[in-house]
Image (cartoon, grey):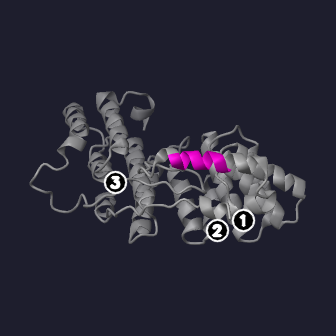
Amino acid sequence: DPLARSGAGGIAENILKRAVQLAKSAPSGRLETLQLLSKYAHTSALAADIYFEIGMDISKQGIDQGDNKDDAIKAFSIANEFIVRRNDTDIPYHIGSIIQLCKIALEHEGDGQKVIDKFNEVKDVHMPDDLHVELLVLVGRAHVSLGALEVAVTEFTRAISFPECSSTPSAHHELAIALKKNGGDPHEINLHFEKALDLGMDPTQEAVEALGERSMPLMRALNRQYYKNYNSGGAERTGGGGIMSGGGVGSQSTSVFAPQPKQNEQASSQSETLTLLEQGASSYDGHTPMGGEVEGTESSLSNLKVKKQQGSESNLQNLRR
């Protein structure tokens, strides 16, 4: 949006962005609040970002639970559609949503070709380096799943050529796996497994088998994982990234589309956000499109359901067998 890009979105835009941040960090009621915020989004970019966060919240609750996969796909698709309909040649797609759709296709549908097709649509688009690396890792994994190991090695090698980011450890790890499957040099394979571990990746069975349990990078990674789990004390995790991680969010016990309770059960957790919403609504000029004005958005959103989070268990013991 020219309005958003120029920074002239006004106080309403800044308030809504702040409200989104509050909703993401809230101990409960995140999905309900994000859905409410989507109705106030007055630029396509802001609406897209809110739907992206809705999709992420659903995904973190467990993509394989109930209708979560379909609901997440809807949210990410709506987010991308907001950007596509702007006809902005500089930013024609919502890359974050494209990446999440690729993850779902690869990890939950086993459709590597769909990932490759989506990658080909956006490969020439300028995007931040960290997103580019994450996308290259996904398309490399897709090629591995289809048996195109040489192509996969090329994509993973491209990924590690970028400045280090959160997906760089996964790039080294996946490159090591592809090289091993392709009969690569064992020393080079081990170097990439070690690099992935040294950059902060949790140990995997592939790394244990390749390096052996006495490997110093592996032992450091196991210790790091142990203390991370110990310090968390079994507390609820509020997020997780990377291909190998399994983050989560607080459980959502009721749907935002269910009848609202008469008692003020959620007032304390949402009061600050709703106060910001009221301020944003008062400053909205009524001339820019709201988030719900993309055709089919409200009906699609109304189908999104809130699920209970399933706790994730550490695989530390299995890795140390």
Q: Earlier in the sequence, mark 2 or mark 1?
A: 2
Residue 158 sits inside the magenta stretch: no
Mark number for residue 294?
Answer: 3
Q: Residue at x 31, y 58 (%)?
A: 252
View extreme (left): residue: 262
Mark number for residue 143?
Answer: 1
Q: Earlier in the sequence, mark 1 or mark 3?
A: 1
Q: Which x, y percent locates residue 261?
A: 13, 57
Q: Which residues are magenta?
A: 222-230
Mark 3: which amino acid? Val
Mark 1: which amino acid? His
User: Relative to residue 179, is residue 170 drawn left or right?
Assistant: left
Secondary structure of residue under mark 1:
helix
As measured in the structure, the alpha-carbon distance from the residue carrying label 2 to the one carrying label 1 is 7 Å
Between residues 282 and 274, which one lies in front from this camera angle?
274
Q: Which x, y percent locates residue 152?
A: 76, 60
